[in-house]
Image (tube, grey):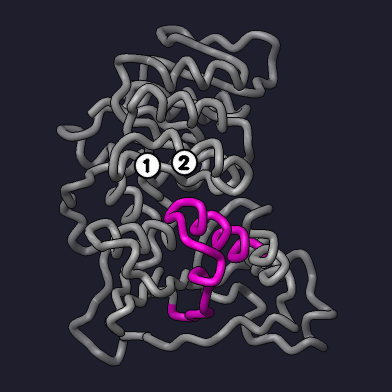
Amino acid sequence: MRVAVIGATGSVGGAVLDICRRFPERFEVVALAAKSNEAKLTELASLHRARTLCLTEPRTASFKAEGYNCLTGTEALSLIASDPDIDHIVFASSGVAAIKALQTALREDKDVSLANKESIVVAGPWVMPLVKRTDQLRPVDSEHSAIWQCIREENKAEIQKIWLTASGGPFRNYTREMLEKVTPEEALAHPVWKMGPKITVDSATLMNKGIECIEAMQLFDLPAEKVSALVHPGSQVHGVVLFYDGTMKLLASSPDMRLPAAAALAWPDRVDLVGSGLDFSDPAKWDLSFREIDGSLFPCFGIACKAG
């Protein structure tokens, strides 16, 4: 499978490329795109033997790297998305710059792995109708991947409710008085995930979880009343689905972005990542504790959900 990664220099892009590196017989990286980090992009291109590179906002007037087809500008992402030599495109960038490229990829009947929540939150009504095949669009965010894996062989009409999970962030056990004294450094100290600064702060306020609920409504075509989130400090369960017959499905795994990346890339197969999962040999290590999000302490969550 010939793969392009948009957002290659970020944390999610790194997880995707790690899977491609582990399974070279399955995945061939042919194109990489980033915002402006030329040094990191060319380093990754050399490691993965990509042929096409793109910087959407290059720091120099001309971006050239010997031996590569070098592109610049947001419009160039659509050229990558329509390249007949590419089978699968991963959208791992943040922001809305890649929306047109995402639409192009779907129109061109490419398989898409999506870790760009903004494109669905902002443009879901103009993106989702372009999906031509079941599982053509595969979520990579851990929570949405969990829901997708739980429902992809189910009748959507039988879903009563879904819950995304949230670690609760660095302030999950804070009181109102404690929240009034937090510092930016504390907000950037996420207890589980290593992410960029903006999404880390949004995770601390739980704004990000509210935005992820909007994304889930669009991705899975569910009304707002069927989508919510729970605080799950253990970060072992990433999504829960309740069906009308009273049964539930949940997906548990280590908090490792390589796992949802592999699920999206390899579908309908699973690749051998033994050793990356949870150790369930000792029940004392299991954590199935959940609690409701306190809207009085984290109002951003409710504001975002209401907007959805």
> Which element is circle 1 on?
strand
Q: Amino acid at mark 2?
A: Met
In this rendering, would 110 be left or right of 124?
A: left
Nearest-to-viewer mark from 1 and 2: 2
**The residue stretch that appears in magenta:** 207-234
- Seen in the picture, residue 157 relative to 175 is either above or below; the reply is above
Identify which residue is drawn at 50% across, 11% down.
70
In the image, farthest residue toward the bottom: 284
Identify which residue is drawn at 62% across, 17% down.
73
- Seen in the picture, residue 138 relative to 176 is either above or below; the reply is above
Report the disc number at residue 211: none
Report the disc number at residue 137: 1
Q: Position of residue 170 (x, y in %)?
A: 63, 75
Q: Is residue 201 visible?
A: no
In this rendering, would 236 be left or right of 24?
A: right
In the image, farthest residue toward the front: 157
Do labels 1 and 2 touch, CB within 8 Å?
Answer: yes
Q: Amino acid at mark 1?
A: Leu
How far is disc 1 from disc 2 in space, using C-alphas?
9 Å
Q: Position of residue 91 (x, y in %)?
A: 46, 37
Identify which residue is drawn at 27% across, 25% down.
2
- Seen in the picture, residue 122 relative to 285 is either above or below; the reply is above
Mark found first going from the N terminus, 1 or 2: 2
The residue that label 2 is drawn on is 128
Magenta highlight on residue 132: no
Q: Position of residue 77 (x, y in %)?
A: 52, 21
Instruction: Tell me where residue 50 sits by quadrant.
Output: top left
Instruction: Tell me where residue 106 sits by quadrant.
Output: top left
Q: Position of residue 83 (x, y in %)?
A: 38, 15
Position of the C terminus by quadrant: bottom right
Position of the N terminus by quadrant: top left
In this rendering, would 299 be left or right of 82?
A: right
